[in-house]
């Protein structure tokens, strides 16, 4: 679905065979996390995607996750180191996309698990929760780019390995810098893709690939 598309709650209720109030409660929670947008008196729609929002999201992720990662490298114990290494190993062995560019949910889970493992050593549930919500929002942009075969995380294997190695080596400064570059590299690719496909519409919203792109 494109950004701004109206979400039909009755359709979701029928599809998942649940009460309409359950769907409404789910939408309210998703709106609270920034994953859908509430329309006053008109229900909910898919959250619009825009270059401005992507840049703001990236800045927020960098700020929250680098601070938390520094704390983790200072405070994390041996169990934390083991969890980071195990999570990275799982991510490394997980396929990112299918043959036609479909995004594999298992990779999304492995990617999130790796980033959670990195931050858990900080011992700050609030920072971890904020980071998770921002990461969920970034997933919208990742899905948006994949129908064209464009992988904003195409260097993620090496990038994630570097972050993991620096983290368990207790190099907080180096790990934070590598994580910052990881986020900013992905954003640069997405912005370039938006320009190449003329995906930026009036008002700054982003839609799927332009016609002619597989």
Image: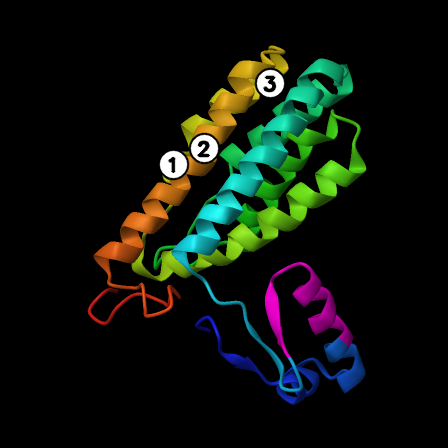
Q: Is residue 99 above or below residue 79?
A: below
Q: Nearer the viewer, residue 90 or 139?
A: 139
Q: Residue at x 65, y 42 (%)?
A: 131
Q: Is residue 70 above or below residue 22?
A: above
x and y percent of residue 32 in the render? 70, 62
C-alpha span from label 2 to label 1: 5 Å
In the rendered structure, the answer to whether residue 180 lies left or right of residue 76 reads left
State the image quarter where residue 197 is shown: bottom left
In the rendered structure, the answer to whether residue 95 lies left or right of residue 74 reads left
x and y percent of residue 179 in the render? 51, 28
- How crowded pointer 3 is (Cα within 10 Å; few <14, some 14-19, many 20+) is rated as many
Q: Are marks 2 and 1 in contact (CB under 8 Å)?
A: yes
Residue at mark 2: 182
**Does the magenta portion include 47?**
no
State the image quarter where residue 41 is shown: bottom right
What's drawn in magenta, residue-wise? 25-39
**Secondary structure beneath label 3:** helix
Residue at mark 1: 185
């Amino acid at each position: 679905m494109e950004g701004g598309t109206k979400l039909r709650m009755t359709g979701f209720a029928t599809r998942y065979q649940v009460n309409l109030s359950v769907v409404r409660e789910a939408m309210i929670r998703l709106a609270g996390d920034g994953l859908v947008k509430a329309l006053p008196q008109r229900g909910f729609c898919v959250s619009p995607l825009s270059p401005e929002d992507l840049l703001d999201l990236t800045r927020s992720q960098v700020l929250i996750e680098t601070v938390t990662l520094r704390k983790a490298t200072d405070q994390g114990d041996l169990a934390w180191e083991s969890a980071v290494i195990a999570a990275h190993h799982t991510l490394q062995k997980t396929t990112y996309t299918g043959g036609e560019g479909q995004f594999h949910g298992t990779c999304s889970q492995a990617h999130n698990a790796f980033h959670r493992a990195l931050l858990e050593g900080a011992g700050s549930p609030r920072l971890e929760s904020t980071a998770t919500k921002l990461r969920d929002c970034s997933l919208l942009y990742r899905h948006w780019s994949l129908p064209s075969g464009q992988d904003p995380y195409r260097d993620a294997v090496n990038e994630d390995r570097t972050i993991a190695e620096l983290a368990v080596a207790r190099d907080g400064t180096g790990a934070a810098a590598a994580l910052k570059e990881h986020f900013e590299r992905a954003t640069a690719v997405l912005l370039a893709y938006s320009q190449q496909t003329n995906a930026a519409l009036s008002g700054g919203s982003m839609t799927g690939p332009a016609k002619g792109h597989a």
